[in-house]
C-alpha cells in the first residue's frame, strides 16, 4: 500500500468507468461521505459499454479502429454520435444524479456542452491502421479537451452542489461553430482534475496497474519517481494504456495525485486516496507538487477557447 493519504476538504475528481463489471453504488456512497466531510467532488463518468449495447439493440455495430501507434479506440460517426447523445447525458448521467440524490447529495448533471464546460477542436478525420496499412478515415465526431470552464464548477461547489460530468463535449469547427463530439472519459476526468488542481481517482474493474497484467499480486503500489513511472508505462496494456496517459495529462496540467483503483472495493474512493490502488504523483514526471506544464489544459470562464 502506498504511504500517502489525502486530507479531507480538498477537491477530488472521481471517474467511474462504464464497464459491465463496475458497480457504481459503493463509489457513490463514498462520494456522499466525502461531501458531508466538506470535500468538493466532481464525478466524471464513462459509458462506452452502454453506447455499444444501445447500438446493438438498434441493430447496428459499434466501430473500433486501431491507430498507427497501436491504440484501439471508438470511431464515432454521425449515427453513433446521435446514440451517444441519447445514452450519456440522457440515461447514464441521470441515473448517477438520481443515485446521488438518494445518498443525500445535491448533484447536478452536466455534459461538456453545458456552459461550454469542456471544449476543444473537433477531429473529423483520424489516422488508422487497417490490414497493416495506414489510412485516413473521415467523418469522425471526436475531440481532445483544451479548455475547462472551472468557474462553472467552482460556482456549483460554492452553492453546495456536486457536479456529475460526462460527454459529449464541444468540438470547435474551422468555421467557428461547434459540434458535439466524443472524448475519452479518462482524459476528460484528467482535464477536469488538472484545471481544479484536484486529486484524481480513476475507478475501474481491477485493483490497480499490475506488473504482470494477469497477476493481481504484482500490483504496483505507487510511482513517485521517473523510473517507477517507466515501470508503470511498461506494465500498462489494453485499456490501462489510456488510464496511464490520462494520469500523466492530469499531473502535467495541475492535478496533485492520480490513483487507479478498484471501483468495487469497500469505500473505493477513500481507500484509493489512502493509498490503495496504484498512486502516481507529480514527482514521477519530474514535477514538483503543484507544478503545471506550459501546455496545460486551460481553465476558463464562459469562453471556450
Image (tube, rainbow, N blue to C red):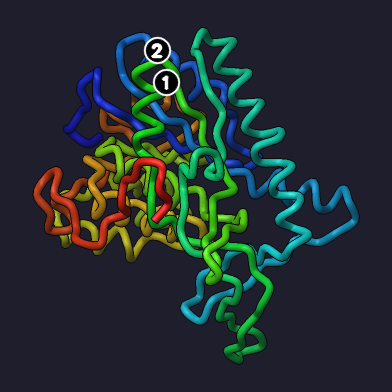
In the image: residue 58, left or right of residue 176:
right
Mark 2 neighbour class, 10 Å CA radius: few under 14, some 14 to 19, many 20 or more: some
Q: Residue 89: percent from the left, percent from the top? A: 65, 37
Q: Circle 1 sits on which residue?
A: 267
Name the residue at 37% across, 9% down. 36
Q: Earlier in the sequence, mark 2 or mark 1?
A: 2
Name the residue at 25% across, 34% down. 1
Q: Is residue 221 visible?
A: yes
Pick out the residue farthest to the right.
59
In the depicted structure, whether residue 236 falls above or below residue 290 = below
In the depicted structure, whether residue 115 falls above or below residue 170 = above
In the depicted structure, whether residue 143 falls above or below residue 273 = below
Residue nearest the observer in this picture, 209 or 292 = 292
Identify the element where label 1 is drawn.
loop
Q: Are marks 2 and 1 in contact (CB under 8 Å)?
A: yes
Q: Circle 2 sits on which residue?
A: 33
Q: Residue 103: percent from the left, percent from the top? A: 53, 10
Mark 2–mark 1 Cα distance, whole angstroms, equals 9 Å
Pick out the residue farthest to the bottom.
133
Identify the element where label 2 is drawn.
helix
Residue nearest the observer in this picture, 187 or 22 = 187
Name the residue at 9% across, 49% down. 288
In the image: residue 50, left or right of residue 207:
right
Mark 1 neighbour class, 10 Å CA radius: few under 14, some 14 to 19, many 20 or more: some
Amino acid at each position: 500500500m502506498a504511504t500517502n493519504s489525502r486530507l479531507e476538504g480538498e477537491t477530488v475528481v472521481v471517474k467511474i468507468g462504464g464497464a459491465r463489471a463496475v458497480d457504481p453504488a459503493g463509489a457513490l456512497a463514498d462520494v456522499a461521505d466525502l461531501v458531508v466531510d466538506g470535500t468538493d467532488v466532481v464525478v466524471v463518468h464513462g459509458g462506452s459499454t452502454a453506447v455499444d449495447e444501445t447500438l446493438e439493440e438498434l441493430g447496428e455495430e459499434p466501430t473500433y479502429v486501431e491507430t498507427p501507434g497501436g491504440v484501439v479506440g471508438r470511431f464515432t460517426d454521425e449515427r453513433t454520435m446521435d446514440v451517444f447523445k441519447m445514452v450519456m447525458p440522457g440515461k447514464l448521467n441521470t441515473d448517477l444524479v438520481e443515485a446521488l440524490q438518494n445518498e443525500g447529495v445535491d448533484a447536478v448533471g452536466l455534459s461538456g456542452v453545458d456552459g461550454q464546460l469542456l471544449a476543444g477542436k473537433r477531429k473529423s478525420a483520424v489516422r488508422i491502421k487497417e490490414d497493416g496499412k495506414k489510412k485516413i478515415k473521415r467523418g469522425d465526431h471526436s475531440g481532445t479537451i483544451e479548455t475547462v470552464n472551472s468557474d462553472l464548477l467552482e460556482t456549483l461547489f460554492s452553492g453546495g452542489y456536486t457536479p456529475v460530468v460526462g460527454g459529449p463535449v464541444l468540438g470547435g469547427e474551422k468555421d467557428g461553430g461547434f459540434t458535439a463530439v466524443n472524448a475519452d472519459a479518462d482524459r476528460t476526468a484528467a482535464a477536469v482534475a488538472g484545471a481544479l488542481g484536484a486529486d484524481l481517482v480513476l475507478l475501474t474493474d481491477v485493483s490497480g496497474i499490475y506488473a504482470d497484467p494477469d497477476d493481481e499480486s504484482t500490483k504496483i503500489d505507487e510511482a513517485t519517481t521517473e523510473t517507477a513511472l517507466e515501470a508503470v508505462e511498461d506494465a500498462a496494456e489494453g485499456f490501462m494504456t489510456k488510464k496511464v496517459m490520462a494520469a500523466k495529462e492530469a499531473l502535467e496540467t495541475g492535478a496533485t495525485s492520480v490513483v487507479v483503483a478498484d471501483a468495487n472495493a469497500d469505500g473505493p474512493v477513500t481507500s484509493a486516496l489512502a493509498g490503495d490502488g496504484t498512486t502516481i504523483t507529480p514527482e514521477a514526471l519530474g514535477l514538483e507538487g503543484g507544478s503545471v506544464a506550459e501546455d496545460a489544459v486551460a481553465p476558463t470562464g464562459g469562453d471556450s477557447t
